[in-house]
Image: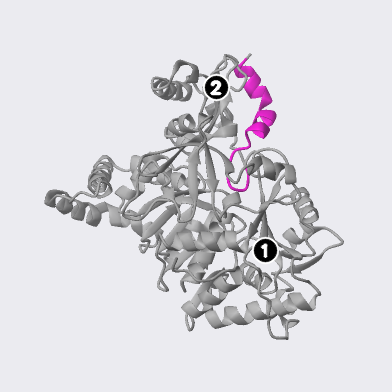
């Protein structure tokens, strides 16, 4: 491998040397984006490490971070690794109850918080440092040289609590070796340079964004922090990134938004936009198959770019050279859309327990519909008895903190059980077909994989979200969250409640479900559906912080609607 660091402290030092004398971080303020140089970051990290030691913290002690993405988060994280401490990140969307559990379970001795709202979650009896009010005074207490501590690569670096779709969060223990080996393998596939700018907007407490930020920093590139997940569209234009990494739901929302804006154009402009996307898709077909693009297609593409495609790309800042999707399989239609626009989009796959990247498509050799091939040093195989994806290698976690039995269940024989179902083709490309624990078993004993069916249903412009049901039931049904912005445009004057029972809306959706059902086995077909007046949210507990649906909680909260479908 071409990446020499052995610990996350080494990653920090390598990143400093790769980009000295340059801007390395950008962050939003009321006056616009401000910058931090490599030297400013180095000074702050060293002072923070000294301040942590001055507080009496010893190697192996835990410190918590409850904050959205910002430079202070990274500064404390790197400082902790210089001092041999273990970081425990929490989502800023965590409830007070969740924070209390994680802080107690991890034994965190100090909590760094974003603001007073996050500080309130810590509760009494545990010291906090508030990024908004007391961080500078904390740094000022670090007036000694940084600690000369060298961690064992096999030692614990961080505990990341998985939000989980059911049950109590579990603390995933990741070592320095887990994370650094994953960074190294990703950098062997994807090239980052000091000229690159990456917009960091997925919560950095999420293993995916954290790994990306480590990799970007290690290569001397710039990390630009988004103001929030709700301001990404504006931040894209402000920082004009060249690299963007996100989960499928983000790309699907952008795809839906652009498609709907095209649908609302005048007939002439709508026809032109669809023609341009068609040309982009034609060129993409040759490119994906590694075949020469005919001259006629090149000429049409140049016209399509000039008239339409470049204007759509400009809404992302106009400089993006690479899009990465990870966390779950991306719908083929969405992947095709971005590639047809002229972007290079590659899919990967992983879990928190694998630090997180397991597989990744290679730029120039991506296979649509797959999440790529295993990264270097990692073995992937399919369990013959049930199709579960199994993983072995240096990226596999040390185990679940204080949960020996669950660790043995997840890694009984050196192979980590991912809980996902998949297939591997002859060239090693992995395809995710479903989530093992989300398989629905009807009362007739038939299994249904809901994810691909939900994906097809979600393609209708009236559908914002969907959840398939049918476990231990006699037939399958779906809960549909309508896209009310579209419905209110097509049926003005009706409120949400009226729209969910409006006959023309129901008829259109039934027509769509009939078309989907025509492609399914008889036991998979959707027999009933119901429209909801509100979407699943993190606040309601129906979504995890990584936007996965908690099926059990949805079924509990929507019991009356579900029972009516089966009444």
Residue 391 to residue 40: above or below: above
Relative image position of residue 196 (x, y in whole percent): 41, 69
Quadrant, the C terminus: top right
Q: Tell me the SS state at disc 2.
A: strand
Relative image position of residue 427 (x, y in whole percent): 35, 44
Residue named by callout 2 = 477
The circle drawn on residue 155 is: 1
- Res. 226 in view: no
Residue 247 to residue 458: above or below: below
Q: Is residue 288 left or right of residue 548?
A: left
Q: Compute the Cα span from label 2 to label 1.
A: 48 Å
Choose top left, top right, bottom left or bottom right for residue 29: bottom right
Please tell me which residue lies in front, 236 or 427: 427
Q: Residue furthest left?
A: 295
Relative image position of residue 60 (x, y in whole percent): 74, 66
Give the residues in magenta.
Answer: 544-566
Residue 330 among those drawn in magenta: no
Residue at point 48% right, 55% down? 377
- Res. 503 in view: yes
């Amino acid at each position: 491998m071409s990446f020499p660091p052995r610990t996350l402290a080494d990653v920090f030092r390598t990143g400093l040397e790769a980009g000295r004398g340059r801007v390395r971080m950008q962050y939003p303020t009321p006056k616009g984006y401000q910058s931090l140089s490599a030297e400013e970051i180095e000074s702050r990290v060293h002072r923070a490490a000294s301040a942590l030691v001055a507080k009496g913290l010893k190697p192996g002690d835990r410190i918590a971070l409850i904050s959205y993405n910002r430079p202070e988060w990274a500064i404390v994280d790197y400082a902790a690794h210089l001092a041999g401490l273990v970081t425990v990140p929490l989502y800023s969307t965590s409830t007070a109850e969740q924070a209390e559990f994680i802080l107690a379970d991890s034994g965190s001795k100090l909590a760094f918080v974003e603001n007073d709202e996050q500080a309130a979650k810590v509760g009494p009896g545990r010291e906090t440092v508030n990024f908004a009010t007391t961080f500078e005074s904390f740094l000022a207490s670090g007036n000694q040289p940084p600690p000369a501590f060298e961690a064992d690569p096999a030692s614990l670096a961080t505990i990341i609590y998985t939000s989980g779709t059911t049950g109590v969060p579990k603390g995933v223990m990741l070592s320095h070796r887990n994370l650094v080996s994953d960074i190294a393998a990703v950098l062997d596939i994807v090239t980052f340079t000091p000229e690159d700018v990456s917009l960091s907007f997925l919560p950095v407490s999420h293993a995916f964004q954290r790994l990306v930020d480590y990799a970007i920093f290690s290569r001397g590139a710039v990390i630009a922090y988004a103001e929030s997940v709700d301001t990404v569209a504006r931040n894209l234009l402000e920082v004009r990134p060249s690299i963007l990494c996100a989960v499928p739901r983000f790309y699907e929302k952008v795809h839906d938004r652009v498609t709907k804006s095209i649908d609302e154009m005048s007939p002439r402009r709508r026809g032109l936009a669809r023609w341009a996307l068609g040309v982009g898709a034609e060129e993409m077909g040759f490119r994906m198959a590694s075949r020469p693009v005919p001259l006629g297609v090149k000429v049409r593409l140049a016209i399509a770019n000039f008239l339409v495609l470049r204007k759509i790309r400009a809404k992302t800042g106009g400089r993006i050279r690479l899009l990465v999707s990870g966390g779950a399989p991306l719908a083929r239609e969405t992947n095709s859309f971005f590639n047809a626009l002229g972007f290079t989009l590659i899919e990967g796959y992983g879990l928190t327990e694998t630090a997180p990247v397991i597989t990744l498509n290679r730029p120039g050799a991506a296979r649509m519909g797959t999440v790529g091939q295993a990264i270097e040093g990692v073995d992937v195989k399919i369990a013959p008895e049930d199709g579960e994806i199994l993983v072995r290698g240096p990226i596999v976690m040390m185990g679940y903190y204080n949960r020996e039995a669950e660790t043995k269940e997840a890694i009984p024989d050196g192979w980590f059980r991912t809980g996902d179902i998949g297939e591997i083709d002859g060239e090693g490309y992995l395809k995710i077909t479903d989530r093992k624990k989300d398989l629905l078993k009807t009362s007739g004993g038939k299994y249904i994989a809901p994810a691909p069916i939900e994906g097809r249903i979600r393609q209708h412009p009236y559908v914002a979200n969907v959840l398939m049901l049918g476990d231990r039931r006699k037939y399958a049904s779906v809960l549909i969250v309508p896209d009310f912005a579209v419905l209110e445009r097509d049926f003005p004057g009706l409120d949400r409640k009226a729209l969910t029972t409006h006959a023309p809306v129901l008829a259109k959706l039934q027509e769509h479900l009939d078309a989907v059902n025509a492609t399914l086995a008889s036991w998979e077909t959707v027999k009933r559906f119901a429209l909801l007046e509100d979407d699943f949210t993190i606040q309601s507990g129906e979504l995890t912080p990584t936007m996965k649906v908690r099926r059990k909680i949805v079924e509990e909260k929507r019991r009356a609607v579900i029972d009516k479908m089966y009444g």
